Image: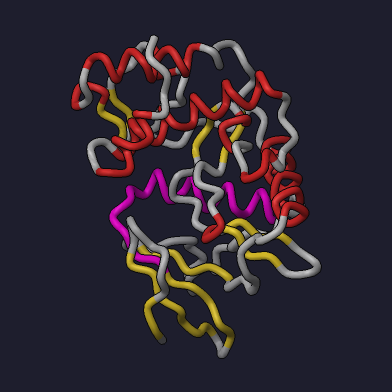
Amino acid sequence: MEPLTGGVANDVWSVRVHGRLAVGRLGGRSEADLAWETALLQHLDRGGLTVPVPIPAVDGRLFADGLVVTTYLEGGPPETRDDWRRVAGVLRELHRLTRGWPQRPGWRSSTDLLHAETGTKVDLGAMPAEGVARCRAAWARLAGRETCVVHGDPNPGNVRMTANQVALIDWDEAHVDVPDLDLVLPGNAAGLDEGAHDIAAQASAAWEAAVCWDDEYSIKRLAEVRAV
């Protein structure tokens, strides 16, 4: 029907399937990556979260030639502190439902990057050595913690809220990592104590710097990571 805004890694359109509004997403991700994401979304839907649910092709496949079609979700972005508290609650439920989930194919967690140099979008070899040292120092503070699936990008544009539900969309950045990375929210809506919030905020800034390096945003985020 028409292109939708917000898709960075994919071509995203509104479509109709048997007369019902849906979302079509076409990208270059591998079949293993798409299998991981669509299985996750089905699992979260069965667990009671409001997420885009894959609509099977006529032969039952959940994706075909890089195309995924999902349900369309109504709603607007969070605006108030109470809205963000609701978002925090949904993120914590995501984390609870995915303990022990396997890593997204080809991805690394923040603590994996204490020793690894690359992982999907991350190439620490492209960053200045001093910046890598700062990022790794931030991630080292997360070492040893339990991991689960994190959404990876819970910004206002990836949340659809109504009076009755909070939906998370755009799972391109989802992977297995430490849950507090998802909980650096406006106004500390997740209620992290001062120490936990500082650890999470520093690790999150380091992650975004590494994932996006070296555009203007990543340089800004790296500047927020304290020197070792």
Using the image, determine if residue 135 lies above or below residue 155: above
Image side of residue 217 versus residue 111, left or right = left
Using the image, determine if residue 227 lies above or below residue 94: above
**Image point (61%, 56%), residue name:** 168
The question of residue 130 being in magenta is answered with no
Q: Position of residue 228 (x, y in %)?
A: 39, 9
The question of residue 40 being in magenta is answered with yes
Residue placed furthest toward the right: 164
Give the main secondary structure, helix, strand or loop, of the magenta stretch.
helix
Q: Quadrant of residue 71?
A: bottom right
Q: How is the image coloured?
A: secondary structure
**Image point (66%, 49%), residue name:** 43
Using the image, determine if residue 209 lies above or below residue 21: above
Q: Position of residue 141 (x, y in %)?
A: 54, 13
Query: Which quadrant of the rendered structure holds the N terminus?
Result: bottom left
Q: Nearer the viewer, residue 193 or 119?
A: 193
Q: Nearer the viewer, residue 34 or 107?
A: 107
Image side of residue 50 versus residue 14, left or right = right
Q: Quadrant of residue 68?
A: bottom left
Using the image, determine if residue 118 lies above or below residue 105: above
Task: Answer yes or no: is residue 106 visible.
Answer: no
Magenta highlight range = 25-46
Q: Position of residue 12 (x, y in %)?
A: 39, 69
Image side of residue 46 versus residue 37, left or right = right
**Image point (39%, 32%), residue name:** 107
Q: Nearer the viewer, residue 200 or 99?
A: 200
Q: Quadrant of residue 101?
A: top right
Task: Answer yes or no: is residue 180 visible.
Answer: yes
**Image point (38%, 35%), residue name:** 221
Image side of residue 106 versus residue 60, left or right = left
